[in-house]
Image: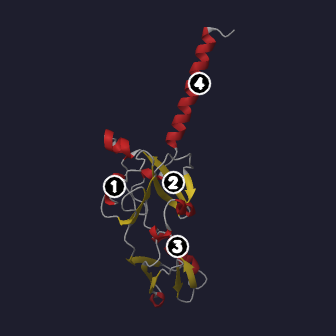
């Protein structure tokens, strides 16, 4: 028979395990706290590639629909989804067999306007220009507001972690609007996607492949 001291010990141990689990979950990194992600090159972007000591190699190029750009002498290289620094390093590596330690500078001349996507049960789903500070509820308003069928406590926010992966977070917009829980009204970043469901969402993975966005948003939105 378990005595009182043993019972108290078991309860304390269980409480400690629960607290450890909660702390571990809280310490997991989340891209939703990110505020200053670096811009990643997209198709139709125009960049100037300057060579400090060999200016004859300097050129201005446009990212083609497949993400590649043509380089003088060195051939083609894919720069889509790279930051400017990553692209600079990739170009330098491409020229390493042609030039000795090339010093390269990149300048972004033209770029696609930052945007967000709002889909699902909103009045005007689609791609929206992102201008200034816009929160999740701002984006819903810009999309014409929820439809009567929307489950306002079942709104999903998708944020790109890297070119292949998105992080997904369920947001209870009803509580934000009704209870003023402004901490959950996340400031949006370029490329964020919001999906308003019309039913309770089943369990989903916190991270998912970008290719699975097609289950939520038409290709024309992206």
Camera-side residue: 127 or 30? 127
Helix, strand or loop at mark 4: helix
Residue occupied by mark 3 = 89
Q: Are marks 4 and 3 in contact (CB under 8 Å)?
A: no
Query: Mark 2, mark 3: which one is toward the viewer?
Result: 2
Helix, strand or loop at mark 2: strand
Query: Mark 1, mark 4: which one is toward the viewer?
Result: 1
Q: Earlier in the sequence, mark 2 or mark 3?
A: 3
| Colour pattern of the rendering | secondary structure
Q: Distance between the residues labelled 4 and 3?
A: 51 Å
Q: Earlier in the sequence, mark 2 or mark 1?
A: 1
Q: Which of marks 4 and 3 is nearer the N terminus?
A: 4
Q: Do the residues labelled 2 and 3 touch (CB within 8 Å)?
A: no
Q: Relative to 154, say whether 72 is above or below.
A: below
Q: Relative to 199, say whether 105 is above or below.
A: below
Q: Relative to 81, say whether 204 is above or below.
A: above
Q: Position of residue 143 (x, y in %)?
A: 35, 60
Helix, strand or loop at mark 3: helix
Q: Do the residues labelled 2 and 4 touch (CB within 8 Å)?
A: no
Residue occupied by mark 1 = 145
Q: How far apart are marks 1 and 4 (CA)?
A: 45 Å
Q: Earlier in the sequence, mark 1 or mark 4?
A: 4
Residue occupied by mark 4 = 14
Residue occupied by mark 2 = 167
Quadrant of the rendered image containing residue 48? bottom left
Q: Earlier in the sequence, mark 2 or mark 4?
A: 4
């Amino acid at each position: 028979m378990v005595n009182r001291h043993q019972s108290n010990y078991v309860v304390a141990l269980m409480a400690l395990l629960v607290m450890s689990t909660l702390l571990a979950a809280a310490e997991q990194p989340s891209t939703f706290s990110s505020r200053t992600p670096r811009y990643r090159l997209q198709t139709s972007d125009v960049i100037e590639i300057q060579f400090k000591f060999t200016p004859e190699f300097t050129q201005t190029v446009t990212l083609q629909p497949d993400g590649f750009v043509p380089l003088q002498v060195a051939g083609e290289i894919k720069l889509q989804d790279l930051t400017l620094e990553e692209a600079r390093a990739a170009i330098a590596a491409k020229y390493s067999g042609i030039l000795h330690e090339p010093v390269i500078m990149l300048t972004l001349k033209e770029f696609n306007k930052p945007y967000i996507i709002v889909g699902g049960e909103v009045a005007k789903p689609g791609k929206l220009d992102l201008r200034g500070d816009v929160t999740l509820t701002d984006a819903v308003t810009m999309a014409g507001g929820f439809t009567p069928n929307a489950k306002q406590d079942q709104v999903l926010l998708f944020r790109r972690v890297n070119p292949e992966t998105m992080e997904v977070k369920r947001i209870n917009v009803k509580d934000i609007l009704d209870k003023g829980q402004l901490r959950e009204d996340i400031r949006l970043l370029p490329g964020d996607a919001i999906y308003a469901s019309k039913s309770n969402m089943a369990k989903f993975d916190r991270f998912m492949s970008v290719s699975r966005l097609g289950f939520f948003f038409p290709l024309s939105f992206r």
